[in-house]
Amino acid sequence: MKGIEKLQKLIDQSQRVVFFGGAGVSTESGIPDFRSVDGLYNQQFNYPAETILSHSFFMRHTEDFYRFYQTKMMYSNIEPNAAHKKLAELEAAGKLAAVITQNIDGLHQLAGSKNVLELHGSMLRNRCMSCGKAYGINAMRGPGVPHCDCSGVIKPDVVLYEEALDTDTVERAVSELQSADLVIVGGTSLAVYPAAGLLNYVRGKIVLINRDATRLDDAAELVLCAPIGEVFSQIQVGTSPR
């Protein structure tokens, strides 16, 4: 496949690669995305999914939020797929500088990636809104609203609609994107802001791997319309000349 060969060449010739990914990276691990035909935003609930995943809804309808969160966004026995594993291999080889992800599932770290910038937080981290005590994911499985020992409500460390991204994470992501000579964008529609807007800081070449067209297709060095795990499984990992 000529597209794979070109991607391999771009990776081999690059000194500093950064990966920017979205929900499509984890679909091959069995986690549904949001905006595809079968995605969460196209399923029928009592409220629109985007409304449920907002800060104001969480505060006003906490029980309904957790009913959705626990049944539709928390998964058991999920494992990293070929994309997660290959990215970890590229980092270990000194080729990949960072993974910038919009996902909250922690699969990049589970695969072995070290420098992972989670723009939207992580479901693996949770904290009491009253006393600040930290909890792991098992405390959130429910059913019902999870409560701390102090009786406060435990909130997942995920960025809901109406909430700001973490400033430090954004600044680090911008720095990584600006210093990369190749940015591989995968599994994202580039429709979620402000995260998608960070790609405006890219100075190097861009490769897009996504099932559907995105706003950056015309600006990309290479566009591959294929499952991201299928693409990465064909990439060979060498050692960076640095």
Image: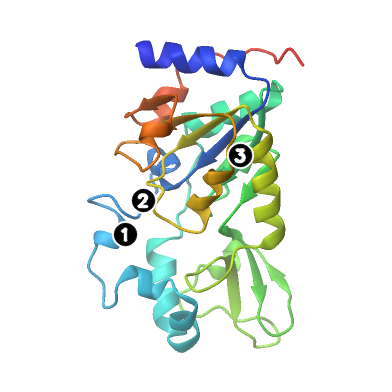
Residue drawn at (29%, 54%), measured in percent from left and top? Answer: 39
Q: Secondary structure at mark 2?
A: loop
Q: Which residue is mark 1?
A: 40
Mark earlier in primary sequence (3, 1): 1
Residue drawn at (45%, 37%), measured in percent from left and top? Answer: 186
* Location of the C terminus (image quadrant): top right
Q: Which residue is mark 3?
A: 99
Q: Is residue 195 left or right of residue 189?
A: right
Mark earlier in primary sequence (1, 2): 2
C-alpha gap between disc 1 and disc 2? 7 Å
C-alpha gap between disc 3 and disc 1? 24 Å
Q: Are marks 1 and 2 in contact (CB under 8 Å)?
A: yes
In the depicted structure, whether residue 47 falls above or below residue 135: below
The residue most toward the right is 242
In the depicted structure, whether residue 86 falls above or below residue 9: below
Q: Position of residue 224 (x, y in %)?
A: 36, 26
| Tag shown at residue 33 | 2
Front in this rendered view, residue 138 or 130: 130
In the depicted structure, whether residue 230 falls above or below residue 111: above
Indicate the amino acid at tag 3.
Answer: Val
* Location of the N terminus (image quadrant): top left
